[in-house]
Amino acid sequence: MDKLNLDKHISGQFNAEINFVRNQIMVMGGLVEQQLRDVIKAMATHDVELAQQVARRDNKVNSLEVKIDEECTRIIAKRQPAASDLRLIMAIVKTIADLERIGDVAKNVARMVENGLGKRSNISVASLETLGEHSVKMLHDVLDSFARMDDEAAFVVHREDEKLDKEYERLFRELMTYMMEDPRSIPNVLDALNAARCFERVGDRCQNIAEYVIYFVRGKDVRHLGTDEIAELL
Amino acid sequence: MDKLNLDKHISGQFNAEINFVRNQIMVMGGLVEQQLRDVIKAMATHDVELAQQVARRDNKVNSLEVKIDEECTRIIAKRQPAASDLRLIMAIVKTIADLERIGDVAKNVARMVENGLGKRSNISVASLETLGEHSVKMLHDVLDSFARMDDEAAFVVHREDEKLDKEYERLFRELMTYMMEDPRSIPNVLDALNAARCFERVGDRCQNIAEYVIYFVRGKDVRHLGTDEIAELL
């Protein structure tokens, strides 16, 4: 085998490994998205059994995180990637950490549903459902931008977080008035507030992932830049 | 220069670079610890000016994160570390992300102090102060374990988080009774609850860092193991 073929071979192997990891992250992302969808459904329909399934399935999300993380470290050690290959692996390592924490959100809300979130009180969970679905949409879109490594699409998700934050603030105020009108509702409303904050944080995590996509494509760390500065860069 | 000397030279350079990064992470950790201490002091003494200083200084924390992160990627690309060297760098990359988010906690609580946290109401901030100081103690101890790469000390911090969680729960219940007794206090108490949750999350972050220390020393990812399983490993 001459050198050229050897290089090709190594590069081919490397590509196969990278593609495997990229594929795994999509599996993990798909699972986390399903977890969120299921917990929102469980919340809206007071389905305790579905909530329990979500809580149990969180183990799978955790295992995928550990597995992908180990695979990334192995690739770095074995293939010694540089430049954009290394950026991709670092972006993956960071993305799985955020995905795992979105998985935790699903598990935490599932526990709340098990404990009667939205059932014991007269609070409508409709607004909470809308907020949750908005956060799932962001996750779906940012995973899509990750799959295609599309920095423009990632930036759209990045900007979307502002709308989610505003939606959360409106819900926060709405829930606060319930408490003031009927102090007996306080414990239940605090549960709902907690769930709302969980969904709001999913948006923050999606924003992080959007930043890693932009970092990979543009080679620039945009984590602490404002929206206008990122817009200018793209 | 014979091969042996060359190796020594390369290894010496590498060590210098690693030590530089380890030093930088201690600078970042020290700054974040100071930020937390200052914001607790600002909260306890209603010192808006100090709170503003904390909010402004968060930029420094963010810059350090980006700088250390870039340095780590540079070292991986240039030095192609393997085994424990690579584990150390991966542990550093993850640790700075958690430190940055503890920095965000300090900034967020600072904003709350600027908006009158603990001043406008008759709620005592003493319990909040105790919770905050407990979280600073955990940060201090986990940074210490990181500096010495002491897995046993890291595990002590890891276990401490359970106590912080219990303290948070007690405070949560205490604050809830205020709201039920006097609904007018609700907005202020919600602020205090928010701050309490922030400090509780500092504990979670410290637990993460403790896990990275154990990962580095033991070569095993303990992120999703229970306390008993980690205890058995050590």
Image (cartoon, coloured by chain):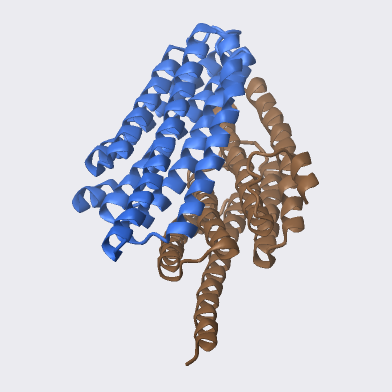
Chain colours: A brown, B blue
Give the percent coordinates (x, y) of residue B187: 63, 19
Q: Is B84 on the left-hand or right-hand side of A90? A: left
Outermost residue on the front side: it is B1
Give the percent coordinates (x, y) of residue B74: 51, 53
Give the percent coordinates (x, y) of residue B89: 41, 51
Q: B90 and A84: which one is in front?
A: A84
Give residue B66's quadrant in the image. Answer: top right
Give the percent coordinates (x, y) of residue A114: 48, 48
- Is B195 placed above or below B62 here? above
Residue drawn at x 33%, y 54% as measured from the top left: B9
- Is B11 placed above or below B116 here? below
Q: A49 and A84: which one is in front?
A: A84
Q: A17 and B2: which one is in front?
A: B2
Residue A113 visible: no
Residue A19 visible: yes
- Is A66 placed above or below A211 here? below
